[in-house]
Image (spheres, grey):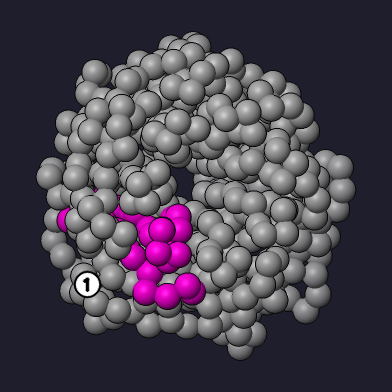
Amino acid sequence: MPKLSSLALIPMLTLTVTVFALACSVPEGQQSVASTNGPDEVEGTDAPHVTSGSTGDSVALNEPSYNTTSTLDSTGSAGWYTSITIGADSLGLISYYDDTNQVLKIAHCDDAACTSATTSTIDSTGWVGIDTSITIGADGLGLISYLDATNGDLKVAHCDNPACTSATTSTVDSTAPSVGWSSSITIGADGLGLISYHDNTNGDLKVAHCDNAACTSATTSTIDSDGLVGLDTSITIGADGLGLISYYDNTNYDLKVAHCDDTACTSATTSTLDSDGHVGTDTSITIGADGLGLISYFFANSTDSGLRFCNSDDCALRVAHCENLACTSATTSTLDSWGEVGLFTSITTGTDGLGLISYFDQTNSSLKIAHCDNAACTSATTSTVDSRMDVPGSVGLDTSITIGADGLGLISYKDVPDTYRDATLKVAHCDNTLCSP
């Protein structure tokens, strides 16, 4: 079939440049206020329910948790395309897009729970900051990949200090009219940045291998060009020291994985892991305690190529557990199918060696967490972390999760009170390893 534009799969951006001065806004560089969700704040259910997985049952705890949630940036429409990591100073570092000003911003947490943060604009040249991804380089400084929508380029920002109050920006791929969508960045075994992303012009999956620590330039390679592929990419480094990339195949509606053949990922072996219905959007990948890849993703029992959100209850959060280092095959499991769930997934491995997944529950307009019950994540315990069940809006979009210096989960996400123009950047700090009540 002919290749379709990936723009149809990306939520509509608000292109206004007017700053809406909200009464609750937090000016850039100032602090924000934290809140704690308790049972009186969000309506829950009286008892847990059980969701059947492919190989086991997962107990879903619907009561809201006591995890601490904090608003970090509420100026205009902030908090789009969030990505979080832990800096060399042991504090959270979050990259995100400010849709009001169409810029790339950074929030540097002031404490381990990220109850407040200092925010900085990193790149304001044109329309920049979509599809951000952040990691910490071998030099201990943040490294951020993102889209320059003005020029259709892949850009990288290298932080000038641990708090990333400023950064050096570079264009690393401008070979096609539109590249750099769905970017994801990690640090390779050689200590250099490795970025997976979508070439929107040719419909391909590409990889950029940084030439130096600051990634002022990079060597780019096309990894998969079989149809319209390479959307919703996520990259990590496997136990064999080679890159492992999860992504969506929009031609066949499948979840795919690419295992790099060398450190620079100039070529890769690709495999289809799940082809059951419309699967593989919103992917995120990590390496489990068993040394094998673990991938979270969205499932919808539909073949509508334009589907991004659920249109029925037949949607789910799924996980694929790789059966070998190259992930040429995997065991898939459904973790949560209670309503319209499983969008905007992000996965990490907790201090207990088990997977921890943040995702959006569209039915209840909530941020949820799934804590894997075993290394293969054939079942999981799910709980609600933040919710807007009693008020208009949605909370838990564009999630990203990491493990803080205190060994507890730290989640960045977008809260939309009523319209996308009023979006805010929020963070949830887990109260326990399971991130549950």
Residue at figure coordinates x 66%, y 72% from the top left: 432
Where does residue 149 sit, x and y in percent of width and height?
22, 37
Q: Is residue 142 above or below residue 323?
A: below
In the image, 118 versus 280, the foreground residue is 118
Where does residue 366 sit, x and y in percent of width and height?
56, 65
In the image, 98 versus 354, the foreground residue is 354
Secondary structure category for the residue under label 1: loop
Residue at figure coordinates x 86%, y 42% from the top left: 55
Q: Is residue 421 visible?
A: no
**Residue 89 is covered by the magenta coloring:** yes
Query: What's the residue type where badge 1 is placed?
Result: Gly
In the image, 180 versus 276, the foreground residue is 180
* Magenta extent: 84-113
Residue at figure coordinates x 53%, y 37% from the top left: 236
Residue at figure coordinates x 47%, y 72% from the top left: 112
Using residue 372 as the reference point, say whether residue 198 is left or right of it.
left
Q: Residue furthest bottom?
A: 40
Q: Is residue 125 above or below residue 400?
A: above
Where does residue 102 sit, x and y in percent of width and height?
20, 51
Q: Which residue is mark 1?
A: 29
